[in-house]
Amino acid sequence: MRRTVRDASAAFTRAPLLTALSITTIAFSLFAFGLFGLVALNIRAALQGVEERVEIRAFVADGTDAQSLAAAAGDIDAFPEVQSVNIVTQDQALARARTELTEFSDVFQSGVLPASIDVKLKPGYRDPATVARVSARLKSYPFVDDVRYGEDWLVQLYRLRNIAGVAGLALGLAFAAVAVIIIGATIRMAVLSRADEISIMRLVGATDGFIRRPFLLEGFAKGILGGLLALGLTWLGMHLIDRYMHFHTVFFSPAMAAAGVVAGALIGVLGSSVAVGRHLRAL
């Protein structure tokens, strides 16, 4: 193991320019992947923010007594999908409409808007099927005239989220494949520069595993360094976007950042394994 570490370390000092090129190439490959991941993360955060506004509003008939409304609210609050229930009187509905639609405040008159029961659902229960099911239960109350929750808007929101998820997975795998190919190419350059040494090691009886280990460790180290550099470049890109484009972006959590660096190391090992294996088979 000590010899493996020494051989891998020597590769860094033997060809510093090639080492720097390899690390930089890995970094920019992972940087492109990181930027895409950051965009996907912020799209997901934005969709979650919109999803939190999903609300079912059950309009009640005029003349419904407060006791019936309170009993219904208590019953609805016990639904497993429900996060909170709020009873909105006619006066409260009028005040809210005048606040949200100030340009039409003169149009709204007392008694025009009905009272309602506003229902917010728990996270994980805001998909169109669940919202429609809860809405159907609200319609079963005899004093409920109508139930609204923006069905078309909700369906489009979840369709967009599903498309973003599939596209994110496909492009993420594509970026990872490109990174493996590029890393393999850079490691192959290092392997070719030591072709004579590898041939001599094979002649004196060195096993493929013995020859392979220093290159795998080298790929691992380059993947780690490239991953750290890519993480720094991604943070810098996010900072510049926040500063000059006035966007509030969400950065990777520490666990996600660590996972990205580890992924860089694994990609480095995979690229090295492919390059070395191909060269050894050619000998």
Image (tube, rainbow, N blue to C red):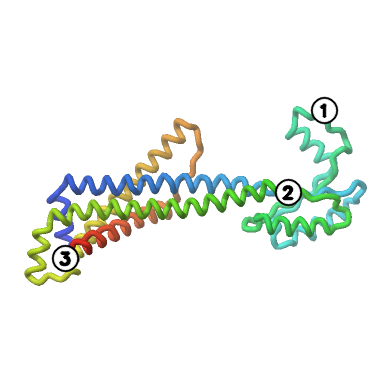
Disc 2/disc 1 C-alpha distance (Å) = 26 Å
Image position of 234 with respect to 124: above or below: above
Name the spot of residue 110 as percent of width and height, x first.
88, 35
Image position of 270 with respect to 66: above or below: below
Image quadrant assignment for residue 78? bottom right
Disc 3/disc 1 C-alpha distance (Å) = 83 Å
Q: Counting residues from the N terminus, which is met first, the one under dot 2 or under dot 1?
A: 1
Image mark for residue 106 = 1
**Helix, strand or loop under label 3:** helix
Residue at image mark 2: 149
Q: Nearer the viewer, residue 282 or 122?
A: 282
Residue at image mark 3: 211
Quarter of the picture holding the N terminus: bottom left
Badge 2 local density, few (<14 within 10 Å), some, or many (20+)?
some
Q: Counting residues from the N terminus, which is met first, the one under dot 3 or under dot 1?
A: 1
> Which amino acid type corresponds to the residue marked 3 in the rendered image?
Ile
Badge 3 local density, few (<14 within 10 Å), some, or many (20+)?
some
> Which amino acid type corresponds to the residue marked 2 in the rendered image?
Tyr
> Is the C-beta separation of discs 2 and 3 under 8 Å?
no
Name the spot of residue 190 as percent of width and height, x first.
17, 53
Residue name at image x 9 percent, y 72 percent: 205
Badge 1 local density, few (<14 within 10 Å), some, or many (20+)?
few
